[in-house]
Amino acid sequence: MEISREIDAPPAAVYRVLADGWSYGSWVVGNSRVRQVDETWPAPGSRIHHSAGVWPLRINDVTVVRTAEPERSLELHAQLWLFGAADIRLTLEPLGAHRTRVTMAEKLTAGPARFVPGLVQGLALWPRNAEALRRLADIAVGRER
């Protein structure tokens, strides 16, 4: 499932939000808090330890950077507790000097969720990822001002 959004901020500003692991809980829908961020985030292999849900039904998980290309892309592997795991790719495309198209692609890759057909995955993930990109845009634009 892939979704895009144009953001009124340059790729450097958008990538600064992605490179700030402590902001993860602010723009990733479903994450309630960040518990720890590796000092090397977003270097490949670095991790964010986060929680999803609300107390007392909070689940602790981890997201790992697969690849990172500053101001261009970030690929993540997110653990989803009993549901399995997902691979997420965020790609930044400059649209002039002060605008960026961010494309987010997510695929469930492990656990029972991987058996959900791609079309159904897309229908389920689209609203969540659209909101995540809206939040990412708000943070990037707000920080840029």
Image: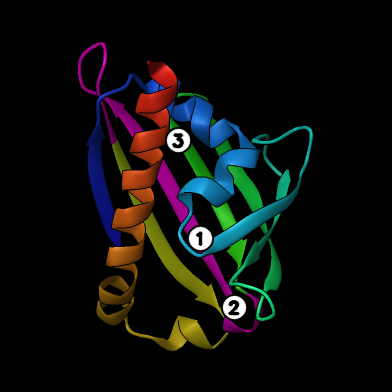
Q: Residue furthest top?
A: 97
Residue under numbered circle 1: 87
Q: How is the image coloured?
A: rainbow
Mark number, residue 73: 3
Q: Say which residue appears at 57% left-offset and 82% top-offset.
A: 83
Question: What type is the residue that disc 2 sits on?
Answer: Gly
Q: Nearer the viewer, residue 55 or 11?
A: 55
Q: Which residues are magenta?
A: 81-101
Task: Answer whether labels 3 and 2 touch (C-beta < 8 Å).
Answer: no
Residue 31: percent from the left, percent from the top? 56, 60
Q: Quadrant of the N terminus?
A: bottom left
Q: CA distance from mark 3 to mark 2?
A: 24 Å
Q: Say which residue appears at 35% left-offset and 26% top-offset.
A: 141
- Whether 50 is among the magenta residues is no
Question: What type is the residue that disc 1 sits on?
Answer: Asp
Task: Answer whether labels 2 and 1 touch (C-beta < 8 Å).
Answer: no
